[in-house]
Image (cartoon, rainbow, N blue to C red):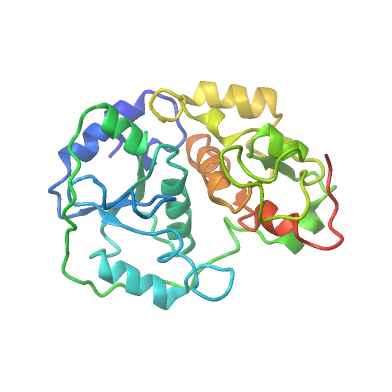
Amino acid sequence: MTDPEIATRGYAHPEVLVSTEWVAQHLNDPSVRIIESNEDPLLYPSGHIPGAVQVDWAADLNDPLRRDYLDRAGFEKLMSRIGVTPETTVVFYGDKNNWWACYAFWVFQLFGHTNARVMDGGRLKWEKEGRPLVKDVPTYPPTEYRAPERDDTKIRIFRDEVLKKLGTGVKLVDVRSPQEYTGERTHMPEYPQEGVLRGGHIPGAKNVPWARAANPEDGTFKSAAELKAIYEQEAGLTPNDEVIAYCRIGERSSHTWFVLKYLLGYPNVRNYDGSWTEWGNSVGVPIER
């Protein structure tokens, strides 16, 4: 059922978003599991939505050894630990950017857990509305969760395939800041400029910073009409395009992936999660500035 507060914005799939009011009304709903996912793992212990569990993007979603995500067994173990079944509606929210909520949502889609939502506005909107935050960590009875093998083909793309796609008409969207896109910086301005040897962008990529899709005052997503003006009228995308989004490590681009795939209904959008950390450290790949 679509949240009435979301339904008026003209999204292709409004059911993937829920409002803070919807979450507040479902805090005690046993069929709903609220999940907080942030860049800073210490944010959750400082206060979180009542009943919410923490899913750490690094410790819980990534393989501990290789640069990859957890496998099927790891995902099943995670879902069992947080008390989720295939029928459970999981609702993600994150810190002020809320891109980590979209990142966790994206990883869950690799394992086919489609019964998933994102709380519009994340912690920023929840806190601005004066809603409660608690420090107690909830526990839920473990479940027997069975997941399919992870599917990396539909919504994820790797470097070698990106290389093959260059010059074929595929549309690349670089969602980083303009300074990262031009190579002036190799990370966001407030972060150390490290982690990559070369700055710049993938040839042919259009720069559409992820934050343009969000309202700065509360982090909520802009309406479909506003999003179309950004991505279609300015960036020249169409729903018929094959689109690849990337950033630095894949988290900001998962926010743009979410916007294009679900809010605008683009059927062929993939996230290049290797992103600039991989591309800018690779030998011999083409770079533009």
- Residue 122 in picture, x, y percent from top left: 35, 38
| Quarter-of-image position of residue 130 | top left
Locate the C terminus by quadrant: top right
Picture layout, residue 14 above or below residue 137: above
Point out the residue furthest to the front here: 192
Q: Is residue 37 visible?
A: yes
Q: Is residue 146 visible?
A: no
Closer to us: 273 or 182: 182
Q: Is residue 284 above or below residue 144?
A: above
Q: What residue do we see at 26% from left, 64% from top?
A: 82
Q: Residue at x 67, y 39 (%)?
A: 240
Q: Residue 136 vs residue 203: left or right?
A: left
Quarter of the rendering occupied by the N terminus: top left
**Residue 174 percent location from the top left of the image:** 68, 41
Residue 49: image location, x then y, percent: 22, 44
Give the mark count. Answer: 0
Quarter of the image where one finds residue 141: bottom left
Residue 209: name its quadrant: top right
* Residue closest to the far left: 28
- Residue 92, position as x, y percentages in the image: 35, 48
**Residue lying at 52% horizontally and 21% vertically, measured from the top left:** 225
Position of residue 126 relative to residue 44, above or below, is above
> Which residue occupies the foreground of this view, 25 or 146?
25
| Figure check: 163 above or below 190 | below
